[in-house]
Each structure stands twice: as C-alpha cells, then as structure tokens.
Image (cartoon, helix red, strand yellow):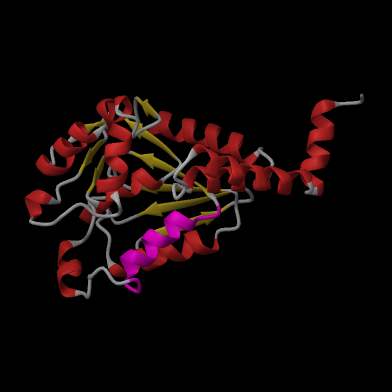
Amino acid sequence: MSIDVVAGATVTTVTINRPDKRNALTKAMYSALAEVLDTAETPVVVLSGAGGAFTAGNDLGDFLAADSGGGPDTPVRRFQEALLAARSVVVAAVDGPAVGIGATLLLHCDLVYATERSYLQFPFTSLGLVPEFGSSYVLPRLAGPQRAAELLLFGDRVPAAEAHRLGLVNEVLPDAEALEARVADRTAALAAQPPLSLALSRELLRDTTDTTVRDRMEVESQHFAKLLHDPATVANLRAKLGPR
C-alpha cells in the first residue's frame, strides 16, 4: 500500500513510502492516509515521505484511470476531509519535493518543518487544471494575493527558505538528520501538553468559519468554560499554580 504507520504512545508517524515514484499518491494510499487520520488516538501525527521526497502529488496514471472527480466519496476527498477534521495535531516533516497536493496539504497541517533542499510547487495551471484543496482560499491569506497568484498561476518551485519567509513553513533544517531531530523535539513538547487543551486549541486554529472577532471570542469562551470543568485541566492548573 506504500503507507507505513508506526503508532507510539503519544505520536503516530506516517511515512509515504513509494520512493521509486517520488511518493506519488494513488487511490489506495489516499484511503490509507484518511484511515490513519480518522482513527489516530495519539495527540500528534507526523506526516513524512521516504527516499528524499515528501510527495510528487497525484499518481497521474492512477488519477486519470480512476473516478477522480470532486465528489465527497472519492478517496482524495476523504483524505482531505480527514486532514481538516483530524483530532490530532498534524506535523509535516518535509525532505525533498512537495508537489501538487503534496504542497497544498501542507497548508492544512498545523506545523511544517523542511530541509534546505526541499521545495513546494503548485503546478495546476501548467497541467491544465485549477488549484485544489482550498489552496486558492488559504494561500492568498498566508502569502498575500499577488504572491499567491504567482505561485498558483506560474507553478514555479518555491524553495524551502522562501516558503519559510512566506509563512508556509515553520523552520528550515540543514538536512534530514537535523529535520528528524527537530521534529522529535517539537512533537515531544506537543505531547507533553494537556491533551484536551491541545485538541481544543487545534480546533480553534482550524475553524475559520467565524466572521468577526466577537464570534471567535464566543467560541473561545465556550471552550474555556469546558476546560475549567474538566478534572484533568483543573488538576493541571492547581499543580502549575502550587499552594496558595
């Protein structure tokens, strides 16, 4: 199936492992990714690619041979919905090319770390297609409308350093070894956070349906009240505050 999964106590590591095809994604691989994201019980999920590539995007042969329309029941749509709705914090570890949906899925990860040799590419227009996975909505809000237009209309490679400058990548590491160490450090720090607080904070960061600051304040207040009635949260607060 070319999707390797290692579920630890606090982190589930998912590796796209099809290096002979630069980790291009098939229907079966999308289904496997969706299943992992839907069922992961760890507070953190790490997505990575094997063999010096994150993913080259869709396997075009599989894509053209299959029913790859935009309906909600296609494997790619199920994967997209699973990533958007994931209960875990999703961390991407990128070493090498992230092309097509390999780039657009990064816009929906919570944290993205990449090596210096990595690049993002949005080649949809040159393929006679249009941007997907909400990239025409998200990218202008991250990079600005003019820069987003360049990225989506020309489809040029975006080196990791430039992606970092645009806010698409959190940090750039010199090589794969440094990337692995940094991701291990950051995921350990995430896993040490109170789990309910972590999950609700991710939900707030992902929910962009509000239209005003007051709308968001109301949602935040609801979650805040929920946490103050959670025994684990109360115990954690008391431990942090100490005797009074």
Image point 51% across, 55% down: which residue?
6
Residue 177 visible in the displayed image: yes
Image point 32% across, 37% down: which residue?
141
175, above or below 153, in the image: above
Q: Residue furthest right?
A: 244
Q: Position of residue 237 (x, y in %)?
A: 79, 34
| 131 is within the stretch colored magenta | no
Using the image as rendered, state which of residue 143 and residue 4 is in the foreground. Answer: 143
Q: Position of residue 28 (x, y in %)?
A: 33, 69
Image point 60% across, 44% down: which residue?
218
Quarter of the picture containing the N terminus is: bottom left
Q: Main secondary structure of the magenta part?
A: helix
| 81 is within the stretch colored magenta | yes
Residue 1 visible in the displayed image: no
Q: Position of residue 175 (x, y in %)?
A: 34, 29
Q: Position of residue 34 (x, y in %)?
A: 42, 63
Q: Quadrant of residue 150?
A: top left
Using the image as rendered, state which of residue 118 and residue 206 is in the foreground. Answer: 206
Quarter of the picture containing the C terminus is: top right
Magenta-highlighted residues: 72-87
166, above or below 218, in the image: above
Horizontal arrangement in the rendering, residue 102 relative to residue 193 (left or right): left
Q: Quadrant of residue 132?
A: bottom left
Image point 35% across, 54% down: which residue?
16
Horizontal arrangement in the rendering, residue 233 relative to residue 40 (left or right): right
Using the image as rendered, state which of residue 176 and residue 70 is in the foreground. Answer: 70
Using the image as rendered, state which of residue 19 and residue 235 is in the foreground. Answer: 235
Q: Quadrant of residue 17?
A: bottom left
